[in-house]
Image (spheres, rainbow, N blue to C red):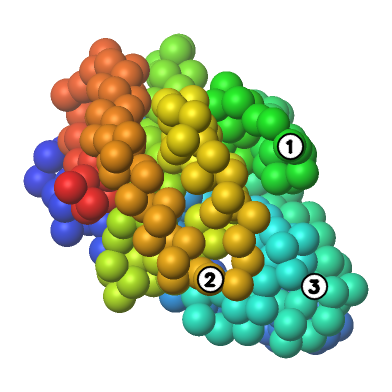
Amino acid sequence: MSVPAVFMSQSTIPILQQEINEALGALRLAERAPRRLYAPAAYLLELPAKRTRPLLCLLAYRAWQPDHTSCMPAALALELFHNFTLVHDDIMDNAPTRRGQPTVHARWDSSTAILAGDALYAYTQQLLVQAFPQQAAALIRCYSQAALEVCEGQMRDMELAAAEAATLADYMAMIEQKTAALIGGSLCIGALAAQAPPGAPEALDRYGRLMGIAFQLLDDLLDVYAEADKFGKQPGGDIIENKKTYLWLRAHELADPAQLQALQYWASVQDQPEAKVAAVRALYDNLDLPTRTRDLIVDYRRQAEARLQPLLPNPALQILHEYLSEVLTRAY
């Protein structure tokens, strides 16, 4: 069953985001006992967020079912899982703030944060089964695969950070798991719940993964070139931390001996952040990395569109792609 076009427009996005926020509030996590377990989870969910993953789930569901109400618990499960990963990531990174506010472990303590994250993860299972008990097996398979890949991707990221040598292939494999797997899984779960035609959940999963890779490449680019007030965090933070991003690894592939020596020198510098960012950015410019990265983002977007094309025209999927494409074009 397709959603009538009259019910689907770009204005659907903020309406769904508001409904997701209201549904999260209706969980009343802060009122659960023991309070010290659930208060940190509620605190994190109250921070401003775009709710991208549950939004994608609902849009995928609406591609075949007109009323997304029954799919909301599954969508919330995806948001809770995402926040579970944020709690644990912040502990591993020893991050003091998230979205401009103290992280859960900084406001409480690491032990409490770990338990709060674990509680969020456990709750996701209940929500998925509650939403579609007859389809629970298929949904759990899709969900657990995405969740497992996120964990594998996080470990790959930690290994990359510690490795003296890393390749672009290593990095691309990492971001497909850590970043893109849950985006694809969110779409797959929405399609499965809606009892989409055979092949559609898999196509949406792959579409989401390709768009997710493009998002991470864009994030790498914006970290170096976006204005601070638009990006929301310190420009050049990846450079200062010597993070092995796409730009950093591609620069090492393209650099001549003198440029490679300069990259290695600035990687060793710890006390000149502004000079370091400016120097490495200039090297990236000389290697034409902004254009190369944008071209790769466009290529992944085109690959994603090819996966989506057999499912069109469909008002909900068209809105979905317009929304994600708008995000991907915000930098250029």
Mark in the foreground, 2 or 3: 2
Q: Which residue is drawn at 64% across and 46% down?
A: 128
Q: Marks 1 and 2, how far apart in space?
A: 22 Å
Residue, disc 1 = 164
- Coordinates of residue 9 in the picture (x, y in percent): 14, 49
Mark in the foreground, 3 or 1: 1
Give the secondary structure at mark 3: helix
Of the pair 155 and 192, the residue shown nearer to us: 155
Count residues near mark 3 (Cα–Cα under 10 Å), then give few for <14, some for 14-19, many for 20+.
Answer: many
Q: Which residue is drawn at 66% across and 78% down?
A: 96
Q: Which amino acid does label 1 sit on?
A: Glu
Q: Which amino acid does label 3 sit on?
A: Ala
Residue, disc 3 = 113
Residue, disc 2 = 272
Q: Which amino acid does label 2 sit on?
A: Gln
Q: Compare marks 2 and 3 and give the one earlier in the sequence.
A: 3
Of the pair 196 and 332, the residue shown nearer to us: 332
Of the pair 11 and 286, the residue shown nearer to us: 286
Please determine whether, in this image, residue 289 is positioned above or below residue 314: below
Q: Marks 2 and 3, how far apart in space?
A: 34 Å
Q: Which residue is drawn at 24% across and 41% down?
A: 325
Q: Compare marks 1 and 2 and give the one earlier in the sequence.
A: 1
- Coordinates of residue 207 in the picture (x, y in percent): 39, 26
Q: Which residue is drawn at 63% across and 66% down?
A: 270
